[in-house]
Amino acid sequence: MKIWLVILFIFLGTFNALAQTHKLLFKTNKGNFKVLLYDFTPKHQQLILNAVKNKMYHDALFNRVIENFVVQGGAHDVDIAEQEKALQPSKRYRLPAEFDSRAFHKMGALGAGRDENDAKASFLNQIYFVVGKIVTNEELNALELKKGIKFSENQREIYLKNGGLPRLDNDYTVFGEVYEGLEVLLKISKVQANEKDYPLEKIIFEITEI
């Protein structure tokens, strides 16, 4: 990764961090990185703070790694489906979506995983980080037409400079971002995985509040 891009993210992250209340340290066997949680997505913020307090993410795994897409951790889709297969849909608890134009799928964004529920509500214990790729103006224009959304000037500028996953905007809740150590996340995203996207080596992490 070019050094100017790392510096850009450190600067932008530090600026954003000044306005937010809670920050997390992700300790991994590949290195550490720091994340700020958005105050304007309070339900998801509180969900992960409770999970940290209850040690839900102690010795957890990044169990889905897709280069130029995402690094995902916590409960895996397969395991959630197995746990819930005997439950009625009304008993499959989810957290209502929180969409905000300030929270979008730029590189380093922290999001909440979900299944194909119509409400786009989030799983309670699955998270992902955006790696993504460079996008073009034409791709953003096409997504606006397809999804019926409008990207702000700020969103366009960041997507065009640094990339991300704009096609996930307004479909999955983003509730934080990496503000230090992005290079560690990018290193994790390049770990070799099998055909089901399981990394071939264990990538262990735990989260503490800073």
Image (cartoon, rainbow, N blue to C red):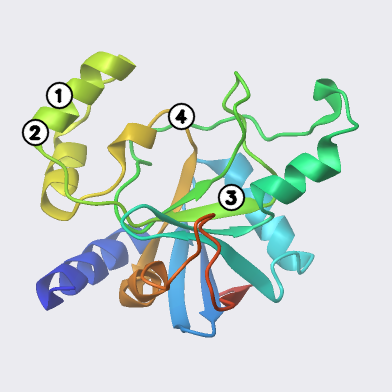
Q: Earlier in the sequence, mark 4 or mark 2?
A: 2
Q: Amino acid at mark 2?
A: Asn
Of circles 3 and 4, the one toward us is: 4
Residue marked by disc 2:
137
Q: Amino acid at mark 1?
A: Asn
Q: CA distance from mark 3 to mark 4?
A: 18 Å
Residue marked by disc 4:
171
| Residue 165 percent coordinates (x, y) | 31, 43
Q: Earlier in the sequence, mark 1 or mark 3?
A: 3
Q: Disc 2, disc 1: CB below 8 Å? A: yes
Q: Amino acid at mark 4?
A: Asp
Residue 10 vs residue 195: left or right?
Answer: left
- Say which quarter of the image contains residue 181: bottom left
Q: Earlier in the sequence, mark 3 or mark 2?
A: 3
Residue marked by disc 1:
141
Badge 1 local density, few (<14 within 10 Å), some, or many (20+)? few
SS under mark 3: helix
Q: Quadrant of the N terminus?
A: bottom left
Of circles 1 and 3, the one toward us is: 1
Q: How many marks?
A: 4
Task: Identify the residue shown where x is 29% and y is 37%.
Answer: 166
Residue marked by disc 3:
45
Task: Identify the residue shown where x is 67% and y is 41%.
Answer: 123
Q: CA distance from mark 2 to mark 1?
A: 6 Å
